[in-house]
Image: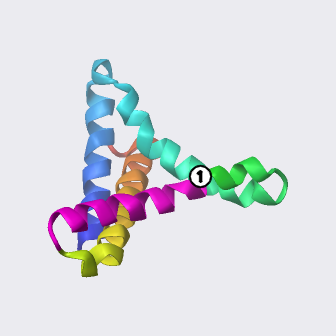
């Protein structure tokens, strides 16, 4: 259900951008860049620089560790990291879907 909710939020953001293009901000591109970065890992067999987006995962793990340590819930580190990844992926795909789907207005 969280995945579906985040997808809907991303789709809603794309709908907002389609209705009010003057509200465009560079932050609207970040979810699309997330998808492109993760997809570029496929090209890592040709150029090692395409491994760079994989640094996202250790950063998410470190950020999750920081959040869990602050709340004194260290046993939840991997669950929190997993939730961040789901959150980013679902939101990104929702926004991409909303931007490329002509029926979304």
Q: Residue at x 33, y 40 (%)?
A: 14
Q: Quadrant of residue 2?
A: bottom left
Residue 85 is left or right of residue 74, and the answer is: right
Residue 101 inside the magenta-drawn segment? no
Query: Which residue is situated farthest in the right direction here?
Result: 46
The relative height of residue 33 versus residue 5 in the rendered view (above or below) is above
Q: Quadrant of the C terminus?
A: top left
Q: Is residue 92 left or right of residue 51?
A: left
x and y, in percent, of residue 8 in the image: 26, 56
Residue 44: x and y in percent read: 76, 57
Relative vertical location of residue 68 with respect to residue 18 in this rendering, above or below = below
**Label 1: which residue?**
53
Instruction: Measuring from the top left, give residue 71's x and y in whole percent.
Output: 14, 66
Secondary element at image label 1: helix
Position of residue 5 measured from the top left corner of the image (x, y, whole percent)? 23, 63
Q: Which residues are magenta?
A: 53-72
């Amino acid at each position: 259900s969280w995945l579906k909710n985040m997808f809907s939020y991303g789709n809603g953001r794309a709908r907002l951008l389609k209705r009010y293009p003057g509200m465009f901000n560079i932050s609207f591109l970040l979810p699309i860049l997330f998808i492109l970065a993760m997809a570029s890992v496929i090209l890592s067999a040709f150029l090692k620089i395409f491994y760079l987006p994989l640094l996202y995962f250790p950063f998410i793990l470190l950020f999750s560790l920081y959040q869990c340590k602050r709340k004194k819930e260290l046993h939840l580190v991997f669950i929190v990291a997993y939730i961040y990844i789901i959150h980013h992926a679902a939101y990104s795909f929702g926004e991409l879907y909303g931007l490329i789907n002509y029926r979304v207005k």
